[in-house]
Amino acid sequence: MNQKTLHEFSHFDEYPNSAFIKIESFAKLMSVSRTTIWRAVRNGEVPAPKKISGRSIGFNVGEIRTYLESKGVCSDH
């Protein structure tokens, strides 16, 4: 896991709802692979990523929190 992903994962609870994280951090939060996240996005099971700029996409922290709360998953580490 690279430093940025580790930082996003370990500081997720500190981010504002308007922030975005990369798929690697979302996968780590869910304890699944990137492939599983993409499959869940395709099936409409998890919030879809948003285009941030150019070729960059990210998952909105607020949407992820809402999703995790709806599933009864606590994001506290």
Image: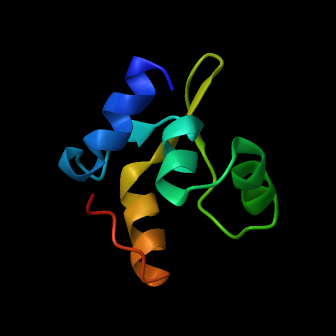
**Can the viewer see residue 2 in this picture?**
yes
- Name the residue: 69% across, 52% down: 37
- Name the residue: 25% across, 41% down: 11
On screen, residue 27 above or below 64 = above
In the rendered image, residue 26, in percent from the top left (x then y), is placed at 52, 48
In the rendered image, residue 41, in percent from the top left (x then y), is placed at 72, 57
- Name the residue: 42% across, 75% down: 73
**Can the viewer see residue 19 in this picture?**
no
| Residue 33 as seen in the image, left or right of residue 75 | right
On screen, residue 35 above or below 55 = below
On screen, residue 2 above or below 58 = above
On screen, residue 39 above or below 22 = below
| Residue 49 as seen in the image, left or right of residue 11 | right
In the rendered image, residue 58, in percent from the top left (x then y), is placed at 53, 37
Q: Residue furthest left?
A: 14
- Name the residue: 81% across, 66% down: 43
How many callouts does the rendering have? 0
The quarter of the picture where residue 42 lies is bottom right
In the rendered image, residue 71, in percent from the top left (x then y), is placed at 50, 81
Tell me the quadrant of the picture where the C terminus can be found.
bottom left
Q: How is the image coloured?
A: rainbow
